[in-house]
Amino acid sequence: MNHPNEGPRNVSSLGPAIRAAYRAGQEDEALEPIVKVNPFGEPLGRIGSGDTVIFYDIRGEREIEITQSLTDPDFSRFPVEKNLNLHFVTMIEYDPSLRAEAAFAKDGKIANTLAEVLSSAGFRLAKIAESEKAAHIGFFMNGKSDTLFPGEERIIVPSPAGIFNYDQKPEMSAASVADEILRKIEDPRVPVVMANFANVDVVGHIENRPAVVRAVETVDAQLGRVVSEAKRRRVTLIVTADHGTVEEWLYPDGQVNTGHTKNPVPFILADFSLDRPAAIDLRPSGELADVAPTVLDLLGLPAPVEMTGRSLLAERPDRFAKRGKIVLLILDGWGMRNDRAGNLIAQSRTPAFDALWSRFPRALLESSGEAVGMPPGTVGNSEAGHLHLGAGRRILLDRVRIDRAVEDRSFFSNAVFLRALQIAREGRRRLHLMGIISHYSSHGTIEHLFALLQMAKDAGLSDVYVHGFIGRRGEKPESGALYVEKVEEMCRALGAGEVVTVLGRYWSLDREENWDRIEKAYRALVYGEGTPAGNFSDRNS
C-alpha cells in the first residue's frame, strides 16, 4: 500500500548520501538530516496523522524531548502538528508523564539506594554536577528515579551554552562544579557530598586529542582544589569513576576509539579525618556496586539487605575517628590502564590524581560487562556506572532483559508491540521504527530493530519506515554509513521496511532543552526537511 502523496517506491540506499556528507566534512554525531525522496523529489515515509511509531531506544533520558514533541498535544517549544494523534510506543518507559506506552515495563522500584538510605538515617546529602551529567547524578544514581529524598539537594551547574561541540571548550564547567563542592565542604549542615566532573567522558567522545588532554588536565586541576580543601578541613575523600574512556583512545589498528572501555576504574580513599589516613586497609579489587556499602561502612551505617555489594574496607572502621564529612567524587570516564600507548590519561599532566594514587589506600573496580548488569565482554557506560554506584548491587540492565526476550522469542509475542502492529494494519497507516542505529550504543542496538522489522513482516505490513539516529561513540570513523547499510540489507532480505531518514544523534537525542536541535529532528521526521538523498542507485550504477 502506497500513500497517495508518496508516488512510486524508491528502493535506493541512503549509504551513498551519508558517504557524500562525510566527504563534505560532516561526521556521524552531528550529521545533518538526510531524507529519502521519490523520483519526483517528494520525501518518503514521513510521520503523519494517525500513524504508529515505535521508538526502540533504551536508556531513556535523551529520548524524552523528541518524544514530547511528537506526542504532547500542548507542546509549545516550537511549532508542531497539533493533530498527529500518533499511537506511540517506547521500548522502555522514558518518563511516566509521556503519552506513550512502554513495551517493557520497569522491573520495579530499586529500593534503598545510597541516597535513600542516607535520607532515612537523617543525613543531608548534596549532589553536584554540571547539566551534561544531571541525569546521572540524580536519576540514575537514585535507581532510575527522579525522586528527591528528604534532605537530598541537587546543585546543577549549567554546561557551556552556544557551542557546537565541547572540544571547543574542554574545560566545560568544571571550575564552577568545584566551587560548589568547596562551598558544601565548608557547610557544616551537609555531611555527605557527591559530585561528578564530566569533562573526560564528554570530550573523550570527540576525535580531538588536544581537547581530550585539556579535559583530563582540567579535571585534575579541579581535583587538586578539592583535595586541598578536604585536607584542610579533615574531610574523608573518595575518588572513583563510572567507566573508562580515553585511557584506551586507540584501537589496535591505530584508529581513534571515541567510546567507552572495559578497563577498571580507580577507587581512592583519602581519609583526611585521620591522623594516619594511609593506615586503612582496602581490598585491592572490587566493582562499582561496592562503593555504596563502603560509604555506609565509613559512616557507621549498616547496609540494607538489598545492597549485595561488599564494603571495600578490609577491616571494620569502628576504631577510627567519627567522620564529620564524606565527599564522593566521580571522575566521569577516568579508566585505569598500565600501557601508556594510546592512553591519554597517562600522557596528560595529572599531579593531583597521581599523588592520591601513590599515597593513599586504593583499589581497582570493575565497571563493565556483568559487573554493571551488561552482557559479558561489553564496555561500561555512564548509565550503568552511576546506577551501580548508587544502588550498591548488580542490576540487570534493560539491554540484557530485551536481548534475552529476543533470544527466547518472548519479544515477538509482546502484547504492546502486537497491539501497535494491529492498529497500523487495521487503520491502514504507516508504521515508523525510530531510534539509534548502532550495535554498541547504550541507547540501543540494531538487533532490536531487526526483531521489530521481522514482526512487521510477519504482521503483513507494507508501509514500514525506519528513521535512524547515528553517532560515533565507541565506533570507528564513518561507521554510521556501515550500520545504515546493514539495516537496509536486512530490509531487503525481509522484504519489509525502508530507511527513509538518517541524522546525527546530536539533533535528536538532546537532554538539556536545546529545542533548536529537537526542532531540526522533528522537521526532518514529520516534514522531510533535510538533504534529499535522491536515487543514488541510479547515480552510481
Image (tube, rainbow, N blue to C red):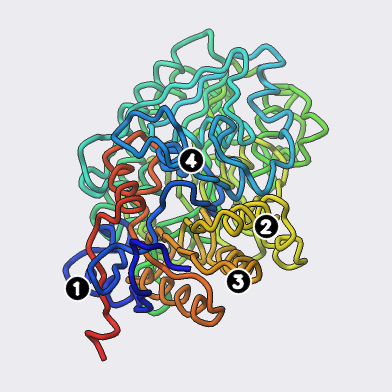
Q: Seen from this angle, which residue lies furthest top? A: 189
Q: Quadrant of residue 410?
A: bottom right
Residue labelled with disc 1: 23
| Mark closest to the chain's N terminus, 3 or 1 | 1
Q: Seen from this angle, which residue lies furthest front? A: 4
Amino acid carrying label 2: it is: Ile
Gap between marks 3 and 1 measured at Cα: 35 Å
Q: Secondary structure at mark 3?
A: helix
Q: Nearer the viewer, mark 4 or mark 1?
A: 4
Find residue 457 and name its label.
3
Q: Secondary structure at mark 4?
A: loop
The residue closer to the viewer here, 372 or 343, is: 372
Gap between marks 3 and 4 measured at Cα: 24 Å
Residue labelled with disc 2: 402
Q: Secondary structure at mark 1?
A: helix
Whether residue 256 appears in this view of the structure is: yes
Q: Nearer the viewer, mark 3 or mark 4?
A: 4
Gap between marks 2 and 4 measured at Cα: 28 Å
